[in-house]
Image: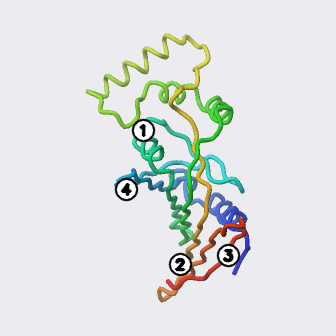
Amino acid sequence: MGSRNPIRHFSTWFRTAVRRSPDRWFDPTAMTLATSNKAGNVTARVVLLKKFGPEGFTFYTNYASRKGRQLSENPRAALVFHWPYLRRQVRIEGTVEPVSRDESQQYFESRPRLSQIAATVSKQSEVIPTRKFLTRKFRHLRKTLAGGAVPLPRNWGGYRLVPDSMEFWQHRENRLHDRLRYRKGKSGKWTVERLAP
């Protein structure tokens, strides 16, 4: 059945995915994030996992983006990791909460300088007239800062998905795949269930 702790189980699979990634173009930290607004309109996109542990799964974005607006209306979300070269996927469902401003600041400062500037000038998900409009803003801010520190944008930072359900899927022959689901009870303890494929 594997570990009774889904985070430990994930850690084992994730380390394997990183170690056995077939080339530099496949990013094992890539995960599909699905969100919805209060009306139930669902959207999905790929984001990058930046940290995980018992507290949850952390990613960063613009809070005013479409996903940020949806999460402010409905903090429930889902993640999917797919590692085709391992024939494995992990599905995670839970509640999303913003990380602390200090944690966002620390991560922002670890990013390449040009990525910091890009995050500052991009009003993510908003319509822009041309690409030139965006690159002009980028060059202007780069020149304005003149090598100085890039301030953490007020509307940019991290989210953490706190899981209450995690499913591990492993391909098997004849479509008899393995599916293990962990569900967190009210006491905080995890129950492990085997699902039919």
Return the residue nearer the eye: 14 or 8: 8
Query: Where is residue 188 drawn, in percent x and y?
Result: 71, 65
Residue 148's image quarter? top right
Query: Where is residue 91 drawn, in percent x and y?
Result: 54, 66
Colour scheme of the rendered structure: rainbow
- Mark toward the viewer: 2 or 4: 4
Q: CA distance from mark 4 to mark 1?
A: 14 Å
- For disc 3, the marked residue is 191
Return the residue nearer the eye: 23 or 118: 118
Residue that appears at 60% across and 74% down: 181
Mark toward the start of the polypeptide (1 vs 2): 1
Query: Where is residue 89 drawn, in percent x and y?
Result: 54, 68
- For disc 4, the marked residue is 42
Q: CA distance from mark 3 to mark 1?
A: 35 Å
Left or right of 187 in this view: 80: left
Residue that appears at 44% across and 46% down: 73
- For disc 2, the marked residue is 171
| SS state under label 4 | strand
Mark toward the start of the polypeptide (3 vs 4): 4
Q: Quadrant of the N terminus?
A: bottom right
- For disc 1, the marked residue is 65
| SS state under label 3 | strand
